[in-house]
Amino acid sequence: TRTPVGIVGAGPAGLMLSHLLALAGIDSVVVDHRTRAEIEGTSRAGILEADNVRLLTDSGVSDRVRRDGSPHDGIALRFGGESHRVDFRALVGESVWLYPQTDVFTDLADARARDGGDVRFGVSDTQVVDLTTELPGILFTDADGVAREIRCDILVGADGSRGVCRSTVPEAARTHFFREYPYAWFGVLVEAPPSAPELVYTHSERGFALISQRTESVQRMYFQCDPDEDPAAWPDDRIWAELQARVRGADGFTLKEGPVTDRSVLRFRSFVCEPMRYGNMLLAGDAAHTVPPTGAKGLNLALADVRLLAEALERALVKGDRTALDDYGPRALRRVWRAQHFSYWMTTMLHRAPGTTDFDVRRQLGELAAVVDSTAGSTYLAEAYTGWSENRPG
Ligand code: DHB
């Protein structure tokens, strides 16, 4: 098969890119080693920046986010046993939307199917070849066991943090920047009503906890744990006791409990690969960078990459301006490093590292108070959390 753009990875980044290219009249083929059901069965983050909600609706993917998602005008930062609201709408005039990544994926996969997009799920033995030539290729075995080859002008690696695209780039041609954290998240889905109107990011002596939501009857919660924690060692009672202990405070706030239907440990780190290009292959989303989950920037950053990348590919392939390919990575990286800082900052401000001293805890509480008691401090958080909009300064 010959196509202008070959895309490895049919997650939100790869599918959104394929969708935007189709709007510009550019064909593409997307391959993924996972099946649709595998991707839909994985719990991921739940917060979309307003710009990405507009991207989904205005580009004609779906308006389901406006019906099934819910706008959140702020969050609570909870520390010292008290909640402090950060009012995004008042501070920066924007909201975020609670809408799970799995639903974003479903909407995109449905839209590509509806519009006749070429998306091949469940392929195996994917390889990317001839990246520095005029005709890079994707070699794979399709879901029926037939060997296939796709040749393209530009190849896009949107295959996540452990994908083949980045690892095919010779080590001498890429620099990795990363940071590990000495903790992980224990994530649960629970059958219970919401415990609070908005998300609650909690600092406590026992470590971080995040109270998020999914629907009126299903909630998503996380608490900081050891990276080697075994989910099987956590029956429902133990999970609830730990979560309640972390959010407890003088105001009497307690979580509404119910059966735990899903539990897993999420390891995390900060990572950036530079440059985001090798020959005629460009990287987007987690294939190029990973953030720790605090602040929910991963999916949002991937979609921001894709907005820039679709524009760059249109300039390169329709208008014949190949310098667009040089501009893409540096432009994307400006936002990537802001998001790296924000995710690192939210993470380290709210978590308790092994060996933390009383000084460290008091300093974190001072930092949190400085954020919530100052318009300048909370405005920075609100700008970053809602996303650095093209239409807003900052
Ligand atoms: C969710 C995950 C996050 O990492 C976050 O910062 C907020 C919400 C979630 O899964 O709902």
Image: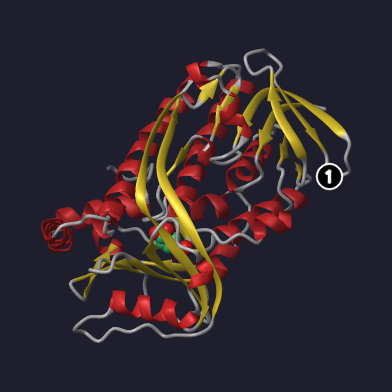
Q: Quadrant of ligand 1?
A: bottom left
Considering depth in this image, is 349 or 263 the residue closer to the camera? 263
Q: Is residue 329 above or below residue 235?
A: above
Image quarter (top left, top right, bottom left or bottom right) of the C terminus: top left
Image quarter (top left, top right, bottom left or bottom right) of the N terminus: top right
Q: Position of residue 49 (x, y in %)?
A: 43, 54
Considering depth in this image, is 63 or 76 the residue closer to the camera? 76
Judged left or right of residue 9, residue 379 is left
Q: Position of residue 128 (x, y in %)?
A: 68, 26
Q: Is residue 306 above or below residue 234?
A: above
The residue at the point 74 percent across, 52 percent down is 35
Considering depth in this image, is 66 or 304 the residue closer to the camera? 304
The residue at the point 44 percent across, 85 percent down is 257
Residue 63 quadrant: bottom right
Judged left or right of residue 363, residue 104 is right
Q: Secondary structure at mark 1?
A: loop
Residue 179 quadrant: top left
Judged left or right of residue 100, residue 96 is left
- Residue at the extreme top of the image, as rendered: 133
The answer, for residue 46, to whether it is visible in the render is yes
Q: Inspect the image, locate mark 1, and give the three-letter code of the amino acid beneath it.
A: Ala
